[in-house]
Every structure is written in structure tokens, then in C-alpha cells.
């Protein structure tokens, strides 16, 4: 029997590591870094974003987590995220997954999920 995407991501522990690494990648990415810098002085906000991201990824990958955050449009409305910024974030996601030794098939599944969210995030 094939393992679920959640299991292939390493379950809650693996997803937490991926999300921690992803936040660091976003902070290092010159295209989107400025969007994340204001939160560095607000560790409570960073922790909340990480928690929501872990829950979202856990839920989307078949885990027991229950995402209770805002909808993608509500979370990103007014941010005016550009196509370039979205692409930079997607590249960070894929690179982070690869650095965490996530297999190519699982990376493709995550890419499909993230790509499907584009219309709910870009230019709102």
C-alpha cells in the first residue's frame, strides 16, 4: 500500500521542519523578503503563520490536522501579490522540499496544490 503524502512529508514533525525551512527561504529570497521582514519583530505572528501553514499542509496532505485559518483569498486580500512574487514563493517551496529530501512525486503533488491556489492569492 502506498504511503500518503502526509507520511511522505514526514508527518507532523517533517511538515514542521519543512515550514520552518520555508520561512527561512522566504526571508532569504530578494523577491519576497520585504513582505516577511516586518514580522521578525513579532515572534507571535511568525509562530501563528507557521502554525497555520503546518495545519494547512497537514490537512491538504491527508494528515489529522484541521486547518482553521482564514481562506486563501481572505488571508491575501489587499496584499497585491504579483505573479513574480507568487513564482518566487513557489520556487522556495520546491527548493525547500528538495532540501528536505522529499521525493519528486511528492514535490509534484505539492506543486499541483500550490499552483491551484494561485487564483486565490495573486492580485487580490
Image (cartoon, rainbow, N blue to C red):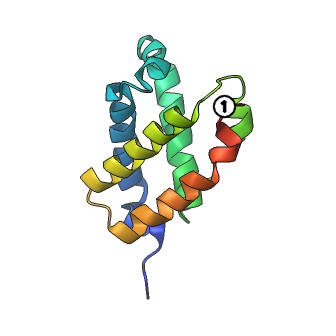
Question: What is the number of callouts on the image?
Answer: 1
Please, is residue 37 above or below residue 104 in the view?
above
- Is residue 56 shown to the viewer in this render? yes
Question: Residue 27, relative to residue 95: is it above or below?
Answer: above
- Seen at 47% across and 73% down, the residue is 4
- The residue lying at 48 percent from left, 36 percent from top is 50
Is the C terminus in the top left, top right, bottom left or bottom right quadrant?
top right
Q: Is residue 65 visible?
A: no
Q: Position of residue 103 (x, y in %)?
A: 32, 67
Q: Counting other residues with Cα less than 10 Å from the Cα at mark 1, is it few (<14), some (14-19), or many (20 or more)?
A: some
77 to the left or right of 105: right
Q: Quadrant of the N terminus?
A: bottom left
Q: Helix, strand, or loop for circle 1?
A: helix
Q: What x and y, as percent, mark residue 53?
A: 52, 42
Q: Residue furthest bottom?
A: 1
The residue at 64%/36% (across/down) is: 122
Residue 80, given in percent of the width and then of the height, sits at 65, 25
The percent position of residue 86, horizontal first and vertical second, equals: 53, 38
Residue at screen point 60% across, 29% down: 81
The residue sitting at the front extreme is 84
Between 90 and 70, the one lying in front of the other is: 90
42 displayed left or right of 56:
left
The residue closer to the viewer here, 13 or 124, is 124
Identify the residue under disc 1: 76
Amino acid at each position: 500500500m502506498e504511503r500518503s503524502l502526509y507520511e511522505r512529508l514526514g508527518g507532523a514533525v517533517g511538515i514542521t521542519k519543512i515550514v520552518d525551512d520555508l520561512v527561512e527561504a522566504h526571508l532569504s529570497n530578494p523577491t519576497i523578503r520585504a513582505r516577511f521582514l516586518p514580522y521578525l519583530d513579532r515572534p507571535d505572528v511568525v509562530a501563528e503563520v507557521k502554525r497555520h501553514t503546518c495545519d494547512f499542509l497537514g490537512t491538504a496532505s491527508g494528515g489529522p490536522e484541521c486547518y482553521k485559518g482564514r481562506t486563501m483569498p481572505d488571508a491575501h486580500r489587499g496584499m497585491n501579490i504579483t505573479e513574480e512574487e507568487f513564482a518566487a514563493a513557489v520556487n522556495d517551496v520546491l527548493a525547500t522540499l528538495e532540501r528536505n529530501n522529499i521525493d519528486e512525486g511528492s514535490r509534484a503533488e505539492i506543486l499541483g496544490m500550490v499552483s491551484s491556489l494561485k487564483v486565490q492569492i495573486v492580485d487580490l
